Amino acid sequence: MNYVVTCDPMNVHHIMSKNFVNYVKGTEFREIFEALGDGIFSVDSDLWKYHRALLHSLFKSESFKNFLAKRVQKKVLSCLFPLLDHMEKQGIEVDLQEVFNRFNFDIVCSTILGCDPKSLAVDLPEVACERAFSEVGESIFYRHIVPKSIWKLQRWLGIGAEKKMAEACKVFLPVPPRKYSIDERRAKQKE
C-alpha cells in the first residue's frame, strides 16, 4: 500500500478545497468505492464541486446546526447514557466502537431519513441495515489492503469479503447505484 498522511490543517485545506482538482481520485478509487455510487465520496471535478456546495450550504445553515445539535443531545440523553449506565450496572463489557458506530448510524438515519432505527437500544438489537452499512465499510477497507486481483477474483467467484459486500448492498442499497456517463453527470449537475 502506498499512501501519504497529513494532519497539517493547511495541507488538508489545500488538498480538500483550495486545489482539489489537482488531487483526482481516479478510476481505481471509484472502483473500490463503487458501492457508494456517484456520491461526494467517489466523484471528482465538477460533480464533486456540486455535491460539496450543496452540503456546504446545508452544514453552514444555522437552523440545520440547531436541528442537529438537538437531535444529538436527545440521542445522548435518551439512548447513549442509559445504555452505558445499564452496561455499568450489569457489569457487562461493551465494545465502545460498536456503540459509537450505532450512535452515528442512528443520528444519520434520523437526520437524513427521518426515522430512528433504534440500534442503540439497551439490548443492542441486530438492525439489518446497520449491519449491512458496516459490512460495506469493512469491504471497502478490505479492497484497500489486498491486491486488486484478489478482491476481483473473490467478486467473480462470489466468495469472501466480496460476497459479504454483495449481500450487504442488497440490504443497504436494494436498487444498485446507477452509473452515469460523463455527459449524464454534467447534465444532472446543470439541473
Image: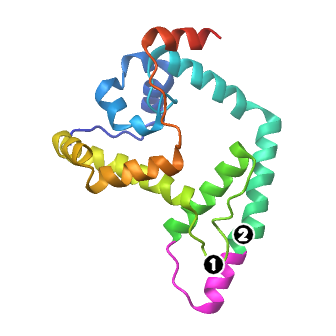
Residue 104 visible in the snapshot:
yes
- Name, please, the residue furthest toward the bottom: 90
In the figure, residue 28 lies in which quadrant?
A: top left
- The residue sitting at 75% across, 47% down in the picture is 114
The span shown in magenta is 82-95
> Where in the figure is residue 98, as x and y percent of width and height?
51, 67
Disc 1 on helix, strand or loop?
loop
Residue 115, relative to residue 97: is it above or below? above
Q: Amino acid at mark 2?
A: Cys
Residue that mark 1 sits on: 123
Pointer 2: residues within 10 angstroms few (<14), some, or many (20+)? Answer: some
* SS at badge 2: helix
Indicate the quadrant containing the N terminus: top left, top right, bottom left or bottom right: top left
Colouring scheme applied when the structure was drawn: rainbow
24 to the left or right of 151 = right
* Residue 87 included in the magenta stretch of the image: yes
Q: Residue at x 52, y 48 (%)?
A: 172
Three-letter amino acid code at disc 1?
Answer: Asp
**With 8 as the anchor, is 52 left or right in this view?**
right
Q: Label 2, on which residue?
A: 79
Q: Earlier in the sequence, mark 2 or mark 1?
A: 2
Q: Nearer the viewer, residue 147 or 55?
A: 147
